[in-house]
Amino acid sequence: MDNYLKIGEVAKLYKISIDTLRYYDKKNLLKPAIVKENGYRYYSIQQLDILELILTGKYLDIPLETVQKKITTGNLEDYYSLVNSQKR
């Protein structure tokens, strides 16, 4: 499965727990690209950008609900404005 990472690989890469990724899935922040019949979760390389947006928001103490709204609208300009205002 080229261009896909297992949930454990993503967790290790970003130094977060598997439970954190499952939580983001549950909250509809970051759904796995593929969920196999055995329950294994796979994320596409492109989804790592979304994860980085989530983690940046978390680092800046932006509520997950706010991050979710900005991500789901697809307007990244709004997200970047939010991040910049939060940094100040």
Image (tube, rainbow, N blue to C red):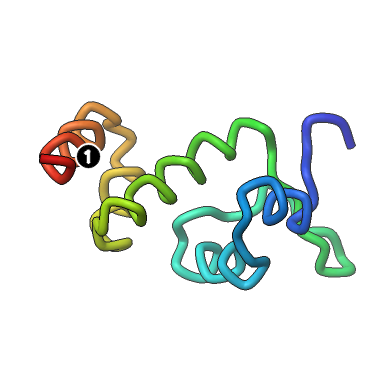
In the rendered image of this protein, does residue 38 appear above or below residue 70?
A: below
Left or right of 8? Residue 2 is: right
State the residue at coordinates (51%, 34%): 49
State the residue at coordinates (78%, 38%): 4
Which percent across, then down, holds residue 86? 15, 45
Badge 1 density bin: few <14, some 14–19, many ≥20, Cα 10 Å? some
- Location of residue 16 (image quadrant): bottom right
Left or right of 70? Residue 40 is: right
Which percent across, then down, holds residue 88? 10, 40
Question: Which residue type does callout 1 highlight?
Answer: Val
| Circle 1 residue | 83
Left or right of 7? Residue 56 is: left
* SS class, disc 1: helix
Q: Nearer the viewer, residue 56 or 38?
A: 56
State the residue at coordinates (32%, 50%): 57
Left or right of 58? Residue 4 is: right
